[in-house]
Structure formats: structure tokens, C-alpha cells
Image (spheres, grey):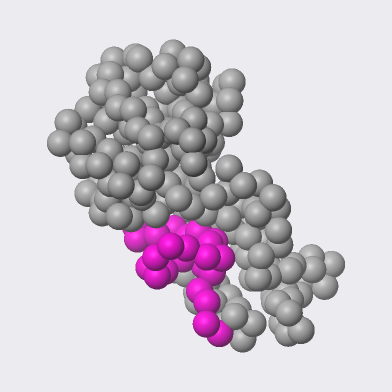
Amino acid sequence: MHEQDTPLILIVEDEPRLALLVADYLRAAGYRVHHLADGSQVVEWAQREHPDLVLLDLMLPGKDGLTICREIRAESQTPIIMTTARVDEIDRLLGLELGADDYVCKPYSPRELVARVKAVLRRTLTPERSSEPGPLSLQSDQLRVRSGNREIELTAVEFALLETLHGSPGRIFSRDRLMDRIYRDHRVVSDRTIDSHVKKLRRKLSELLPDQEVIHSVYGVGYRYEASTDEPPP
């Protein structure tokens, strides 16, 4: 592969040791890497160099990650994975619907981060793959889900939950966001209600995909749909 064909990852991180560690892991995985520590330099550099993915810290000198994410999204669909040291910030980020492709909470495993990068790039650099239906085919008019020659029927709530997750593979949905999507009347339900629906949905999907988990828990945040990952599901 020519160097110009190798995906370029922009690391925006003001902790030098962490940035160096992440860069080493990404290079070992075969990516080109550039590092910026000052948020005020990011948008101009991205406009000029067109990275394939931006790994963006939330708290930065010069300009914060939220502002950078908005400015990048205003003019491009460059994939963005945001990082933060606070779990509760991820819930807030999800609520803001900034358009980031994934969110990772510090401290994180560099291997996990590389796996997330690979998953996002797999969807964005190979659109022909992401357009495929994957292991599940959803039939909204009948509230049925098919895989191969097997088929199951879901409740309306279960189908809405699966349809939301399945429609944005890899994207993390907070429980609050899922409740907004599922309960259009904005009824008040608890987080445990969503967890209960997910548990029942997983049990039914195991009849179609006995050897594969497609709905993954993101600790402290919510859920995501991923038909295939480089690491075992959490």
C-alpha cells in the first residue's frame, strides 16, 4: 500500500505521554499519525490535510473539543472519535447530538481505542460494506427480524429499539436517547426499563444468531449495535 493510501489519523490530545502511546499503537496498526496539542490549530490543519479520522479530546487548550467537533461537522463528515476523562460527560455529549462517530472514556486501553478506530474507518472508508444488511434483515411492517432462513417476531418497543441501534451501527446511544426514540409520547420510564427491553431483545436475537452478540453494552453510557468487531464483545 502506498503511503498516500494509508489512512491518516489526527490525534488531538494535550497529554504528551498519552498522545505518544496512542500514536505508537496506531502506527503499529498501520496508520499514519499526526498529533496536535492545541485546539486552536485543529480545524485549519484538518481543512488543509483532510485526515481520515480525528481522535479528539474534550478538554484542550486554545479551543475545546465540543467547539472543534461542531466546526468540523459544519463543513465535512470526517469521522470523529471524542475522548473524555469523565463518564458523565459522555452522556452530555450524546445528548448534544454533535455528530461524533464514537465516544471513549479515559482511562482507556490503547488496544480498545485502535479497535474503535478500525471499526469507524471500516464503516466510512468502505461504504459498500456498510450498506450491506449484515446478519439481520428488519421487516418493519410485520415487526419481524430475519437471518438466513430463520425469523422471529418482536414487540413494537423491541423492534423500535433494534431499528434505532441497527440503523446506526457502531454509534453509542445513551439510555435517555433510546427512550426518546422508543417512547414518542415522552412517558417517564426508568433506565432499568431500557435495560429490561435490551435483555429481552438479546434473548430473542440469540435464536437467530446463537454465536454472535450484536447489541453491546457501553459501561456507564448505553448501548451500540455492532455486527462484527475485532475484539470480543464487552
Q: With respect to residue 91, does 2 lie above or below? A: above
Q: Quadrant of residue 36?
A: top left
Residue located farthest toward the left when viewing the structure as drawn? 17
Q: Is residue 115 magenta?
A: no
Q: Quadrant of residue 17?
A: top left
Residue 53 in the image: x percent, y percent?
46, 35
Q: Nearer the viewer, residue 228 or 107?
A: 228
State which region is magenta.
Answer: 210-234
Residue 130 in the image: x percent, y percent?
65, 53
Residue 188 in the image: x percent, y percent?
54, 58
Q: With respect to residue 6, does 178 lie above or below? A: below
What secondary structure predominates along the stretch shown in magenta? loop
Residue 139 in the figure: left or right of residue 136: right
Name the residue located 54 percent from the left edge and 26 percent from the top edge.
73
Name the residue located 27 percent from the left edge and 38 percent from the top edge.
23
Give the quadrant of the C terminus. Answer: bottom left
Is residue 62 at all visible to an observer of this figure? Answer: yes
Q: Nearer the viewer, residue 88 or 44?
A: 44
Name the residue located 49 percent from the left edge and 30 percent from the top edge.
4
Residue located farthest toward the front when viewing the structure as drawn? 2
Q: Quadrant of residue 67?
A: top left
Residue 158 in the image: x percent, y percent?
64, 70
Q: With respect to residue 55, does 62 lie above or below? A: above
Residue 117 in the figure: left or right of residue 105: right
